[in-house]
Amino acid sequence: MRGGERSSEPFYARSLAERLAGVRLVLTIINFGVLFLDAKFEASSANINLPIGVGVACAFFVYALVSYGMLRYGYAKLATYELVSPLLDIGFAVALISFTGSYTSPFNLWIVFGVIGTGFSRYAWLPWLATGMGFLGHFVIASVPQPVPLDVTVVLVRSTFLLGVGAVVAITTSYLTQQSKLLAAIESAAGEFSQAHTEDDVVTILLRNLQSNLGLDEVWVSLEGRAGSEAIKHVHGLTRKLLASNQDLGTVVIGTNKPISKQQGSLIAVLCDRAAAALYRIRANERLAESRALGERRRIADELHDNFLQTLAALDMRAEAARILAGPQMEAVQSELDAIKQIARDAAQQVRDIAIAPLGAESLTTAGLEALLQSRWPGDVEMDVDASIALSDVESRALRLLITEGLNNAKRHARATKVTFRMTRRGASVVCSLEDNGIGMQPKFETGYGLTRLRELVEEAGGSLDIGVLPDGGARITAEFRRA
């Protein structure tokens, strides 16, 4: 495993393994001091092969140094290391003890170290296996010729005591380690959830933590109001709701054939609760941002009403005064002044539309369409609308601009007297069109900002825009919104 692969492991697991490997490295260095003192003062029996003992101690040291380095720099796969290292500890311990006094060797505690070390691994069964190997190793050591014959009962009692203590410590440590890992996983996930900015971030963090901490490969997450929320209901497995403040925010389904332990169930519940809290926070922030945006739009609407509309009203009044002063003999001047008055009134109406529209709902209804057409068109209006069609917010925005731009062009350029609006279904699409009975358009005409912006909005809604001339005169603007 290279350093880049560390991200798939919980930070606490490798840190714990590094510290245990560091303790092993220090103890293997102490081995040489013990050998020196044992040889100098003959603390153990004469059944010592010092050169071989030193060789085994050197090999033990090299193994400890290499394992620490591989862990420290990310070259060891943690799961393999946790499985193999305690067994190697016991194996080196048996070899070292066999050549340094056998059953009376001062290095007997290395076997206990190997057993206790299994308590820090992810494998709950490993302490039992290491204890069995420890018993086996003790009887191998006891089989080495001893200066004084060993009493089998003494060997059995001593081995049972040493390894029993080691096993109890290892099993207790294993339980505490699993609990510590659980708490560390929860804290780590909580930190990630607190930094999530989007709902997709929350889903990614939840999936990664469920998979890395529990080894679950088949996990599905759906969020209410988003695509796929219905399909997940047909997936079989352990189901967990994402609830926050009595709101159903989504569903997590875990597909597994293995029984979920109580500890795993607790971790799943906590992770789902943290994910739900993060989703609730993100949605609350989005609502707050929308509220602030609405407040800013209201402020702008007030500014338009208090300033710009008053300016247009003054322009209208001055044009009316100039028309009166011009007198009836100046028909051409009056005609131009009438045009100025109409432009000022149209501009005022456009400003009112901008000021009022943001304060209402984004989505257009049939009644809203009818009110919009009648408020913007003084002539005949014909409507053919399928009332069962519900428009999204982005489709409604595009349709508002289609109606506004189409009516402006029909009034100012086409000299139309009647418009027809249709909104119908065509297969899986919704087709909206606005026609007028005016003089039509030139074969080659340049689209201004309004029509260009209209095309952008329609395409943002996943649709297409077509602008054309009717066979009997007049123009037609058609927007087709494709529905999946």
Image (cartoon, rainbow, N blue to C red):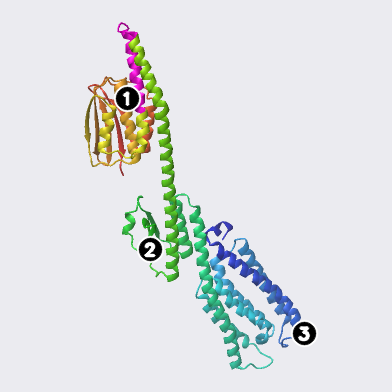
Kindly report which numbered mark, 2 or 1, lies closer to the viewer in this rendering. Answer: 1
Secondary structure state at the residue bearing disc 2: loop
Marks 2 and 3 sit apart, C-alpha to C-alpha, by 64 Å
Marks 2 and 1 sit apart, C-alpha to C-alpha, by 58 Å
In the displayed structure, would residue 416 be above or below residue 371? above
Mark 2 and mark 3 lie on one chain; the one further toward the N terminus is 3
The spot of residue 278 in percent (x, y) is: 45, 55
Residue drawn where x is 56% and y is 78% of the image:
169
Residue that extends furthest to the right in the rendered view of this protein: 40
Q: Amino acid at mark 3?
A: Phe
In the depicted view, which residue is nearer to us: 362 or 200? 362
The spot of residue 144 in percent (x, y) is: 64, 87
Label annotation for residue 408: 1
Q: Residues within 10 Å of mark 2 (few under 14, many from 20)?
A: some
Secondary structure state at the residue bearing disc 1: helix
Assess whether mark 3 and mark 2 are in contact (beta carbons under 8 angstroms). no
Is residue 77 visible in the rendered image? The answer is no
The spot of residue 286 in percent (x, y) is: 43, 46
Residue drawn where x is 37% and y is 22% of the image:
313
Mark 2 and mark 1 lie on one chain; the one further toward the N terminus is 2
Mark 2 highlights which residue?
255
Magenta highlight range: 326-350
Q: Amino acid at mark 1?
A: Asn
Label annotation for residue 328: none
Q: Is residue 66 left or right of residue 331?
A: right
Kindly report which numbered mark, 3 or 1, lies closer to the viewer in this rendering. Answer: 1
Q: Quadrant of the C terminus?
A: top left
Q: Residues within 10 Å of mark 1 (few under 14, many from 20)?
A: some
The spot of residue 262 in percent (x, y) is: 43, 71
In the depicted view, which residue is nearer to us: 271 or 221? 271
Label annotation for residue 41: 3
In the depicted view, which residue is nearer to us: 314 or 387? 314
